[in-house]
Image (cartoon, rainbow, N blue to C red):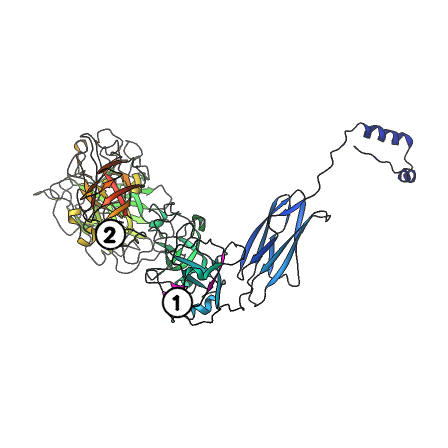
Amino acid sequence: MKFILNRTYLINRMIPLGMMAAMIFATTSCKDEVDLPAPIIKLDTEAILAPSLLSSFNVAVESNCDWTASAEGEDTGWLTITEGKNVGNGDLKLTLRPNETSAQREITITVRNEFNTAMARLSVTQNPSSGDGLVSVSELRSLSGTSHLTLGEDALMRGVVVSNMQHGNFPDRLIAVEGKAEENNGIAVRTTDEYLVSSGQEIEIKLKDAQLSTDPTTGLLVLTPASDAAISRTEATSIIPTPLDVSIPELLTGKYESMYVKVSGQISSSDINKEYLYEAGSFVDEDNNAIALTVFPDCSFSESVIPTGSGHICGVAGSYGGAACIYPGNVSDFSLTGSRFDGGFSLPYIISLMTNTATNFDGRYIEVDRTSENINEYFARTLDGSGATIKWNLSEKGQYYRFWTDNSGHHNFQLGSWVDNRDNYLLLSYPAGVEFTDGFRLQFGWSGQKNAPRNWEVLYSTDNENWSTGKTSTIFSLPKDMVGTAGKGYSDFTVDVHIDKPIAREDPLYIKIRRADSNEAVNTGASISSTDGRAIFHSCMLLDKLPVHTTTASPSGAIYFEPFDGLTEGADYRLGDKLSAMLNYAGSDITEWSDDIRKSLTGTNVRQRPGYAQIGYVNTVDVAHGSYKNETGELITPKLNAAGSYRLSFKAMAYKNKAVFASAVKDRKGDITQGIIEIIGGGTINGQTSVLFGAMDYDSFKTFTYSIENVTPETQIRFSSSPASSEYSRWFIDNICVK
């Protein structure tokens, strides 16, 4: 330690000599200190040239001391330093308001420490929005009725790119360009070849001989320069685009087309149980206003998991197929982590009778209250906190009730009897929170003993007093002479209820199943009675909106694409064990599909699932669980009508029975996870006529990709499986694409 005595100081303070000696002794016993390094402040850039619109920048500060940033200039009000004080390394965050003038403006930012012993400067210049032959984006949009622009020789349009070409979720060969953060200030620019430019970069376009048109595929207003050479990057520093906060109704006006926006809401309840982002159809706000969410299947984040919460999405506002939409540019554009605002439950919603063990009354997803002495006062409630319940009203002449675990997986309520004509019923109560415009779909398991009613009907209510079957019949009938017993005779049903008027989100929903106006029993010659007259509600009750046929756009360059969007039947296997034995509930066979759904596909044992197809089948209704028989399937595409070499891709997932707790069920180990692809009619796949693919997952789709060579117009692709005699081979296929 260095120590210097100031003689005058000592005399003036008249320090005693003894004390001074002690101080000298103490200080001479210390080690010498190392000199502190000189303070340093460095910036990662010395100058920023900003575009005219609202923009923000992060400037990295390297420092070993404290620092503060301040702006210097005649007018500093257009620049805000939001984070300009720190110790050590950090970021200097700048926000620039739009420059609405015809003159360039400049500010100098000085970053210094407290004692002015370290300093760094940053020059910030912002371009003007007008002058020098500049034509604004809004002016161009006002000329949308003119196909050929007749502007001055030196006319230019300048704007910032807000679409993200690196992730591929904007129409091919189009660039979204924004002039300023006000309505009617975005436009799509078409390029002839792939033009690589990043989001946040400013570009300049020469308008001589440019054309304006409406793109027939998307509905976007498009500016097409005379050539790609008319497009150039300016010297402006790349910015972090700032999204404009708008509402869904504002987006639907089209005034924010091709602009970078932020909109609040959540992915619609009908989409959140789908698997991937590109399958999500719409984004809704708290008032249930909706806009299409467009994520192309071949963009970089298309197979990201669908976010289920509320919050906001950023992206380019636009249209596709003429309908308003938003194009997110990256997975980071999704910020949906809040609680959903659509009430106590979302669709599809399952009241599951899956049991937790092989013990009766031990529900995995419901619990049963049996505290009353009266069976008709028993009820079951869901364990998810939604408040959904199951109740019943059975005849006093022969009451019977049991929540039964079943070793075939058809876990069920045994309910009897039903001899009081239509006064006996099963009642399901749902909390408020879901809107139904046209109606809803119910999928459930139902069976009966030989003296149970054969014919049933579904009614609905919003007040538990006034009941209706809706606009069409809701009667469903059990198969004649097939009773539910010994692991078979358990049927699955789909009932579509077309409601009389819309059901608001504020209204609860009540579903009642009762005898139809018929005295027919299940068995021929039998009569409805208390003895052997129980109805059996099994597996689950799945509630969803009425299915809507959608069409996924073909990927760019595809010569064949089959997304199976027209398939709506059966239960969605991906909903998991809540379906109980209805995991196996597939829809109609391909031989029964209408021509517009089949689209020249052919096959054997190919059945509908909602939005995808099932290859292979096991009959679990007519056959007891100890005798299930595997029926292999095959699906054959139409002729490709093309020649050359292509890439084949498709999504596949294997089947596994997840609904039982007994080894008596033959298929409980899971079906095989490999399939076969064959090329017929000419050509090869990976150099062969057939390949074995796998392994498929049991819980989600996996994408498989192969090369197919020497394709002829007669070439077809066959998908199948070849199990051993003891194996089961159901599997699912989606999004077959040849490109």
Q: Which residues are magenta?
A: 201-226
Q: Nearer the viewer, residue 704 or 277?
A: 704
Residue 160 on image: x %, y %: 49, 59
Residue lying furthest left in this view? 525
Q: Give the side of residue 484 with respect to residue 686, left or right.
A: left
Of the residues shown, which amino acid type is indicated by label 2?
Gly
Q: Is residue 96 above or below residue 717?
A: below
Proximity of marks 2 and 1: CB atoms separated by less than 8 Å: no
Give the vertical position of 222 relative to 301 (above or below): below
Q: Residue at x 88, y 29 (%)?
A: 21
Q: Pick the residue in front: 594 or 89.
A: 89
Q: Quadrant of residue 314?
A: bottom left
Q: Secondary structure at mark 2?
A: loop
Q: Is tag 2's residue or tag 1's residue first in the polypeptide sequence?
A: 1
Task: Report the disc number at residue 609.
Answer: none
Work out whether 35 lies above or below 275. above
Q: Position of residue 625 (x, y in %)?
A: 19, 33
Horizontal and vertical percent position of residue 472 = 20, 57
In the rendered image, residue 680 lying in the magenta stretch gets the answer no
| Disc 2 residue crowd, few under 14, some 14–19, many 20+, Cα 10 Å | many
Q: Quadrant of the N terminus?
A: top right
Give the secondary structure at mark 1: strand
Give above or below for 463 relative to 618. Answer: below
Q: Nearer the viewer, residue 14 or 103?
A: 103
Specify the amino acid type for callout 1. Leu
Give me the disc on residue 212. 1
What residue sits right under mark 2 in the picture?
566
Q: Is residue 147 visible?
A: yes
The answer to whether 204 appears left or right of 703 in the picture is right
Q: Distance between the Cα atoms at labels 2 and 1?
A: 36 Å
Residue 582 seen in this snapshot:
no
